[in-house]
Amino acid sequence: MGNFSEEINRRRTFAIISHPDAGKTTLTEKLLLFGGAIHIAGAVKSNKIKKTATSDWMEIEKQRGISVATSVMGFEYEGYKINILDTPGHQDFAEDTYRTLTAVDSVIIVVDVAKGVEMQTRKLMEVCRMRKTPVIIFVNKLDREGRDPFDILDELESELKIAVRPLSWPINIGQRFKGVYNIYEKNLNLYTPSKQVVTESVEFKDINNPELENYIGQGDAEKLRADLELISGVYPEFEKDEYLKGNLAPVFFGSALNNFGVKELLDCFVEIAPSPKPINALEREVKPDEEKFTGFVFKIHANMDPNHRSCIAFVKVCSGKFVRNENYKHVRSGKMMRFSSPTAFMAQKKSVVDEAYPGDIVGLPDTGNFKIGDTLTQGEELHFKGLPSFSPEMFKYIENNDPMKTKQLNKGIDQLMDEGVAQSFISQYNNRRIIGTVGQLQFEVIQYRLLHEYGAQCKWDAISLYKACWIECDDEAVLENFKKRKHQYMAKDREGRDVFMADSSYVLQMAQTDFPKIKFHFTSEF
Ligand code: G4P
């Protein structure tokens, strides 16, 4: 077992999240460079969806196709096995990102120094906070003019609602950017703009050493000393435990494009970031070092080739060792399944693997058996929690446009919902089916896929809704009264749970005020 627990301890499974354009792809690429997983910059294809493509979702899917290859990037670094889980940049796929966050043990957030905290970052951080995921923040683009780093720290703290602690500190910015002082390791990294070269650092235990002036000049040396003094006055010492509990985010500064400050980030990351942790199932807590294999599906990627309706189900190994060709139980169906060609992802290559350890992700080819959230075990009845659906933000009625193909349409909708493309509700008021998404694009995706994969035609009817929330109440009578009074707003989700669909924030507020005993939930798991 010695080897087994070592394998677990050396794993770091995480995601990089950011608002589009902050530098996520660039940082990912630099991390892969350090791991020797790729050898030249520019090798990682961005799965960023260009803004011009929003009206052409086929183009988007093509680009998204790339993201199968980059869905998980595994590499070795200094004895650690690192798994980066990629998240789609386009906000219409935010739901994909939320789910990916359920499969990681920690997160690195990239923030643009000129732009500070942006909308997408704020939303994703909410998910991290909910799950108590440890986060490290990388403030990027210091080679460009930007905001004062103290301002940025304040903003991170107030906007992301997490305590911060700088572990590196920039010396000037933009044209005058000279480098960073690594507070964590007490050394000085001098900046030379270059996309390929890794800068050497100078050890600098005593910041008061007059040598500092020789490196960065008098003005910047004085400023750095003053800044560092202020930092140690204002921010408490870095405590790893607080970071691991998700209460405190260490902050690094650098320039991903110039590969600057990235090594410091990576070195600190492998040291402090958590290895796979116990995960809660409905029945019990599952520890990674248990002998028996367990895992769950957190993402399903459909093959866009209309001739093969196949997908890849991404499974996070939670405990034990996953072994190729073993029989595993698919808990939802009760069926035993065997996987002869599970894939793992090293750097950007996908290859068949014989075994995988907790923290690893395996890709299982699938033809429609899997559903997001499904559990695989060696026989135990386990159901992993923590794959909530989030309250959708856009809604349309879906209608059948070809009465001969009703069966195909229903099957198609069911499978697409299983994949997590969108959520479906049935209005209790008029019995019509409502599809809820987080972005406009999903409607186009659904319509296209129904036609090309299922031969079914749908059309959309407008419905004006503001938010869907799951409701709950201990007092059955109150709940019934609510449902009667709000009949026109009530719907059921696919599991038959009650959902309140408010058509304006006012209606929602009124409902909350009038029915204080009812709990309104904005995620499906509570
Ligand atoms: P994303 O995945 O978060 O969306 O961001 P991405 O890495 O694609 O970076 C967005 C843009 O910011 C890219 O420029 C990238 O080159 C640039 N960038 C990333 N890190 C830095 C940095 O440290 N300094 C500076 N100055 N720029 C940085 P682009 O022009 O949009 O794309 P490209 O044509 O360079 O690929």
Image: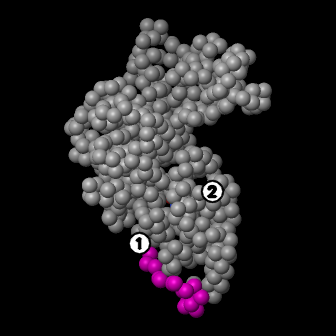
Residue nearest the observer in this picture, 288 or 93: 288
The stretch of residues the image draws in magenta is 199-215
- Find residue 466 and report its horizontal and vertical position in percent: 68, 29
Q: Residue 274 lies in what quarter of the image?
A: bottom left
The three-letter amino acid code for the residue at tag 2 is Ile
In front: mark 2 or mark 1? 2
- Find residue 281 and report its horizontal and vertical position in percent: 44, 38
Please say if 479 is above or below 520. Answer: above
| Quarter occupied by the C terminus | top right
| Labels 2 and 1: the sequence-earlier one | 2
Residue nearest the observer in this picture, 3 or 110: 3
The three-letter amino acid code for the residue at tag 1 is Val
Q: Residue at x 60, y 66 (%)?
A: 165
Q: Residue at x 46, y 60 (%)?
A: 273
What distance separates the C-alpha of mark 2 from that of mark 1? 34 Å
| Quarter occupied by the N terminus | bottom left
> Pointer 2 and pointer 1: residues touching (CB < 8 Å)?
no
Residue 200 in magenta stretch: yes
Q: Residue at x 43, y 51 (%)?
A: 277
Q: Residue at x 45, y 52 (%)?
A: 105
Q: Disc number at residue 511?
A: none
Label 1: element kind: loop
Please say if 90 is above or below 517. Answer: below
> Does residue 173 appear anywhere in the picture?
yes
Residue bearing mark 2: 162
- Find residue 391 and report its horizontal and vertical position in percent: 60, 33
Label 2: element kind: loop
Q: Left of 83 or right of it: where is 154?
A: right
- Find residue 449 and report its horizontal and vertical position in percent: 43, 25
> Does residue 39 appear anywhere in the picture?
no
Residue bearing mark 1: 197
Residue nearest the observer in this picture, 162 or 450: 162
